[in-house]
Image: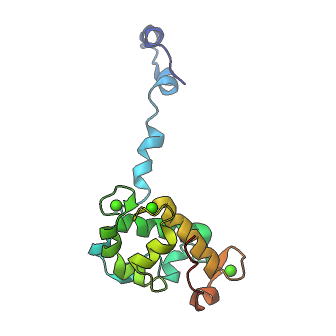
């Protein structure tokens, strides 16, 4: 896209070298700054087997309410769901297989008593026995909507503490 011929650039740069070609270099050189800032965003999640179930990023209202404004937004909830996925995907292959779900069973149990089997029954929409991130996020989107009983797009403490209706049946 922003490719420029090196044959054109090199003599140009050489010609202005004495005067300094910093300006030209910034304009046409490899743009490293945007990619360089990406890894600094968040540390990798610890594997689910390395932390106690109390560290479940989806089980604590206060941890989910990252902005500390007294309610959990769908974005905050999705962030927690993604963190738990990363903790359970110990092979880092982008899906949760039976062994990984079993390893995460103690954490899943804190989510309305989920078991690996009951989770697969409702969330494994292509029935391959594994959960992709998108299957997991779709399940959590449904779960968020279920907990947000007044449908205002936020989970407040009352909704969080209320008994949740049973999980929706698998299609
Ligand atoms: Ca995996
Ligand atoms: Ca699947
Ligand atoms: Ca609500």
User: Does residue 84 appear left or right of residue 164 in this picture?
Assistant: left
- Residue at 49% in and 60% down: 126
User: 94 or 27: nearer the eye?
Assistant: 94
Pick the quarter of the image with the N terminus: top right
Compared to 110, does 38 lie above or below?
Answer: above
Compared to 40, does 13 lie above or below?
Answer: above
Q: Quadrant of residue 99?
A: bottom left
Q: Position of residue 118 (x, y in %)?
A: 45, 78
- Residue at 55% in and 65% down: 138
In this view of the protein, can residue 127 be seen by the observer? yes
Q: Position of residue 19 (x, y in %)?
A: 46, 15
User: Does residue 162 appear left or right of residue 23 in this picture?
Assistant: right
User: 151 or 136: nearer the eye?
Assistant: 136
Compared to 153, does 36 lie above or below?
Answer: above
Pick the quarter of the image with the C terminus: bottom right
- Residue at 58% in and 78% down: 168
Q: Quadrant of residue 78?
A: bottom right
In this view of the protein, can residue 47 be seen by the observer? no
**Dividing the image into four equal quarters, which quarter contains ligand 2?**
bottom left
């Amino acid at each position: 896209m922003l490719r420029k011929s090196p044959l054109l650039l090199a003599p140009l740069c050489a010609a202005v070298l004495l005067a300094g070609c910093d300006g030209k270099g910034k304009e046409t050189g490899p743009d490293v700054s945007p990619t360089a800032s990406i890894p600094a965003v968040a540390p990798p999640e610890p594997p689910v087997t390395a932390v106690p179930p109390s560290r479940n990023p989806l089980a604590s209202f206060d941890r989910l309410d990252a902005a500390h404004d007294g309610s959990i937004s769908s974005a905050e909830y999705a962030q927690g769901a993604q963190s738990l996925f990363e903790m359970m995907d110990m092979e880092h292959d982008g899906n949760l297989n039976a062994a990984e779900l079993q390893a995460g069973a103690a954490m899943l149990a804190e989510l309305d008593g989920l078991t690996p089997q009951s989770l697969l029954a409702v969330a494994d929409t292509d029935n391959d026995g594994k959960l992709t991130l998108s299957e997991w996020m779709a399940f959590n989107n449904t779960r968020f909507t279920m907990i947000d009983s007044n449908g205002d797009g936020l989970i407040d403490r009352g909704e969080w503490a209320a008994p949740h209706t049973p999980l929706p049946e698998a299609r």
